[in-house]
Image (spheres, grey):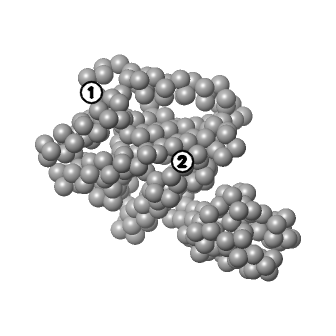
Amino acid sequence: MTDSTISIDNATETEPPDTLKAFGAVHKAFRKRAGYTQEEYAPLVQYQPSTVASIEQGRRFPHRRFVAEEVLDAFGVLKGVYKHAGREKGLASWFRPWAELEEQAISLYTYENRLVPGLLQTEGYARTLFRERVPVLTDSQIEAQIAARLERQSHLGERPNTAFSFIVEEFILTRGTGGTEVTRGLIDSILAVTEQRNVEVQVLPMTRSVHAGLDGPIRLLETPENEWFGYCEGQESGQFIANPKTISVLHMRYAKLRSQALTPEDSRCLLERMRGAL
């Protein structure tokens, strides 16, 4: 492991949502004190006014640049509160660094060979996964997990300038997780998402016996500053990757996977045939 590869464990750790509400309330007070409306403040921190509103309501985790001490003349108070702000229930501590960058990414690439990527999951599919989780989750924990997952999915609709690319193994969709109705709804949802010009979904067919993703899932993203990061997830842990050499390898593998998977158009045709067979 290099200095730019961070491994974080304790997957079950989550912070109470009250910490986000506290940060939002404090930020709102300093923003008003500085004389800015949400519409005036948003461009200063490269956010949309709706995002500023979500953060101040405690519904969204803020990026570090949102803590604009100099702009608001907050005497270091915001930085202090930010240190204790946690993402909403349902997002594990080891996933937070990636989720924070994911919210602002201008490019997001995902290859999965285990299950449907979180950003493409329907509520029914996600509920099935969480109900079968070991150790068993309580009903409240399941609802918190689902709420957090569905909140992340808002990125697809709210950011038309972000390029989303997904490569998914065919057998994941034919497994029938959750039953026929859940699978039907899942395929319908994916087909609907692919109608967006900034979302590309490719299916890696089962006939492809050898491919570039045999070492496991791949996640890559590009920040507004054109920096690339990677993320690998395992049992009860996640690995955040910033090492340029490792990022280069992941890029090469993802590019190869794109050529080995069905084209987006052929993938849609396959999904439509799968949907019709249910």
Residue positioned 38% across, 23% down in the render: 260
User: On residue 162, which mark appears?
Assistant: 2
* Residue 60, quarter of picture: bottom right
Quarter of the image with the N terminus in it: top right
Nearer to me, 137 or 270:
270
Q: Quadrant of residue 175?
A: top left
Q: Is mark 1 on a helix, strand or loop?
A: loop
Q: What residue type is labelled 2?
A: Thr
* Residue 22, image x, y percentages: 66, 75
The correct choice, above or below, for 20 with respect to 32 in the image is above
Q: Which residue is drawn at 55% across and 42% down?
A: 107
Q: What mark, if any, has residue 259 been given in the picture?
A: none
Residue 98 percent location from the top left of the image: 58, 48
> In this rendering, which labeled residue sits more in front, label 1 or label 2?
2
Q: Work out which residue is located at the far front of the displayed protein and give it.
A: 197
Question: Callout 1: 10 Å neighbours few (<14), some, many (20+)?
Answer: few
- In the figure, is residue 18 to the left or right of 277? right
Q: As displayed, is residue 32 above or below residue 188?
A: below
Up-down relation of residue 101 to residue 36 (above or below): above
Looking at the image, residue 6 lies above or below residue 17: above
Tell me the element at label 2.
Answer: loop
Which residue: 85% across, 71% down?
A: 73
Q: Name the residue under label 1.
A: 206
**Which residue is at 55% across, 37% downward?**
220
* Kind of residue at disc 1: Met
Give the mark nearest the N terminus, 1 or 2. Answer: 2
Q: Which residue lies furthest to the top in this view?
A: 210
